[in-house]
Image (spheres, grey):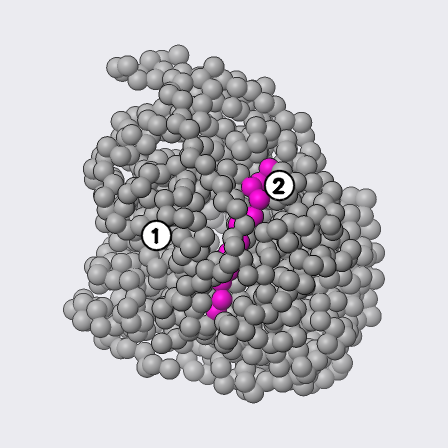
Amino acid sequence: MTQSPGAGPALQPRPVPGPVPAWAFPAGDAGRIPSGPATLRCDLPGRRLAAVRLILKAGAGREPGGAEGVAALTAHALLEGTEPGGGTALTAAFERLGASLYASADLTALRIALDVPVTRLGPALELFSAVVRDPALADADVARLGRERLEEIAQEDADPGSRAMRELRAVMFPDESRASRPTGGSRASVEALGGADVRAFYGSVVPAEATAVVAGDLSGTDADAALTAALKGWGGAGAAALPSADTIPPSSAARIVVVDRPGSVQTYLSLGHGVPDRSHPDWPSLMVASHVLGGGLTSRLNAVLREDKGYTYGVRAGLLRLRHCGLFITQGAVHTEVTADAVADALTELRGVVSRGISDEEHGSSVRALADRAPAEYETARAVAAELADVSANGLGADYPSRYLEAVRSSTPDGVARAYREHIDPEALTIIAVGDAEQIREPLEKLGYATVTVAAAE
Amino acid sequence: MAEQPLHEHTLGNGLRVVVCEDHVVPLAAVNIWYGVGSRHERAGRTGLAHLFEHLMFQGSSNVAEGEHAALLESAGAAFNASTSFERTNYYETVPVSHLELALWLEADRMGTLPAALTQANLDNQRDVVKNERRQRYDNQPYGTAFERLCRLTFPAGHPYAHTPIGSMEDLDATTLEDCTDFFGTWYAPGNAVLSIVGDVDPEQAVKAVERYFGGLPTGPATPPARPGDLGPLGGVTAEDVDEDVPSPAYFAMFPLPSDGGGDIEAAELAVEILGGGSGSRLYDRMVRRDEIATEVWAGVTRLASGQSLAIVDAVGPDPAKIAEVLDEELGRFATEGPDADEAARATAQAERGFLEQTETVTGLANALSQNATQFGDPSRVFTAPGRAAAVTAGEIKDMAERWMAPGSRTALIYGGAS
């Protein structure tokens, strides 16, 4: 035992950790239900909560013209059950099994998620089957859910972070791109939707394009047979095919848009730039670059904006995953008074990767942070199933998570800096500032980075 | 994971250690609960426990400023801390190869934090915490509801009348000496529980804890805690909130029995049946049938040395109508109690909640620390589903009648956009 100087407590010298144990992303067994969905089965010993994810290629990106919001509304209406006006019957049936059912839609897919103790997977899949095959999607439920969506829009717009994200997409994507508008639809588009729209949309789903993932401790369960029984013979109503999703890329140019939120004590900042999608070989390097900039407490942005200056509770930089592209986004809330100073400091850091690259130490630390946290990130069946379902929805292949982790590990500091320089131009960032325009507009103009516009009031 | 036996050990300096093997993933979760939270703060220094939690990441004798986070981040660790009314917890889930490093980091700050405390660090983290307060509460619609409800529910000066984030004035007034005193009073091995869950050999893990923490001094006994009791509320105390929010809303708070006995199990099931999710009574009545609300939510915060708390909130154009229907439903429930199916459903959901809470090494380590700190028995975590299943419909009714009767709560009324 070594003694520290003075009368302090007896402490040990700092231990030197050995190598991190090997770990591999769980592999799934691929299959297909005859003329139905592709399947992925992932046996995870010890995981007593099973996860089922059914991914339908019916995201908001494939909504028929004018019906914006119908994908999200369909997802919510599915949870209302198989009988018109069934009320709590469906929820109660899942609750009795200790199960839960969720559904949601993003631009890429409509996702139905079932979580249940593995001991009751069989009966839960029977209920799940009824929901998928024969949902009521009744007029009265859809009308009510539409009103709930209108309320949700109001809540989202009042939240600085989600308001910033909405504006970032609206500014960066051209009007003809579905990504430029809210995934769940706008006030006007949702008000125009009814039960017939929802039923037509769901009727256009092609089961053979879907993927079903089941994960958990499946030993001793007949998960394969239960999943097959649940989805075999499920057929769409043969309605008109859904249009293809557009692949219009975002535009990157220097601009600052203030969304006025009078009286805000903070400004929510979001700085965005378009990048390629996840299938591009530079994606893993861009993930490393994002982590160096804003991945943790010691990242460059947090070292300055939080730990040095105290401007914020925290800033993060990361990549938003869309099917046809990605967005590099730096975001966080800063005290109103320091808004322009915080933008200036953020720009300095975002330019720094271009001008001085990244160090070996920063690179090594970020690679380890991204790759070595995977066992914890994918500890539950839910997390594994969601990731497998997501890569499937995006056409990346079930081996994508492993390939991605391998690519992160084999990246180099120079390669990461090169990828950043090639795909991200710090002089062409879209900067959204949700805050008190009266206080922040002039200081932002004085930065001289770009013209400042104030988003029109609604 | 399957339930594994627990290995418990107490060091000579009072540190309680709990170890649980779980070989599903090559990880080790380290979790420390210190028996101090906002309920232990004194008047004029609200927010100190939480501000101090931030300072615990600013270095100690042998750890430079920023180094704690740097070492853990570059190990792919998930790490953080949180402060609540009754405790402060610190946790990291690391590759099992880094278990000893994690223990060493925790021991260094448990033993030597004041060595690295500086005015500059305090000033910086004070600014960070003030921005945390703005971000999470002041700049969010309805963000201060919980804080306001606690202030309405408990008498002024009661240990639970203020929430852990504290007030801007008190944060501004906090001095370096306050922080050193706080550390000296509360941060000692005898006021902490350390849990380790993961791909470890229990005997080796206990030995490692002994090696890194064994040299820390015992520290003084902690001061006695002020009583946190409060009975059921008699009447409705409501406050109109003049805040620019997207829609009118009604928020209600009810004190409930303390955690630790059979009463809270029944009371929590009552809240679940009333307002937990889209299958609940309040959701069905207010959102689905009457369409007077677009959203209803209910939840319970369990507290062990004071009353637990239930919150029910509903967003809808007419808060007075919501309050009226809430009273009707509370009255019906207190009179009739749940039907057998409702009780069975709530029990099944409690089981899933238990599995969700304990299926990760991180979650299980936290639950072990909690049960050891608050009830002196870490293995109590595994009895949660059984405790819920043992509750009868009659007990649920009794708890609803006693604690959630119509006309006895505190409430906030939000009027909507200005």
- Residue A223 position in % (x across, y down): 79, 53
Q: Are marks 2 and 1 in contact (CB under 8 Å)?
A: no
Report the residue at 62% width, 61% height from top.
B330
Residue B132's disc is: 1
Residue beneath label 2, please?
Answer: B358
Assign a secondary structure to mark 1.
helix
Whole-number angstrom distance, CA of label 2 to CA of label 1: 29 Å
Q: Give the chain of mark 2.
A: B
In the displayed structure, B215 sits above or below A401; it is above
Along the line of sight, which residue is nearer the eye, B262 or A422? B262
Along the line of sight, which residue is nearer the eye, B277 or A432? B277
Q: Amino acid at mark 1?
A: Glu
| Dot 2 or dot 1, earlier in sequence | 1
Q: Is residue A109 magenta?
A: no
Main secondary structure along the magenta-highlighted residues: strand
- Residue B371 position in % (x across, y down): 57, 34
Along the line of sight, which residue is nearer the eye, B228 or B220? B228
Estimate how packed mark 2 is, as few (under 14), some (14 to 19) or many (20 or more) residues with alpha carbons within 10 Å. Answer: many
- Residue A143 position in % (x across, y down): 62, 81
Magenta segment: B249-260
Q: Amino acid at mark 2?
A: Thr
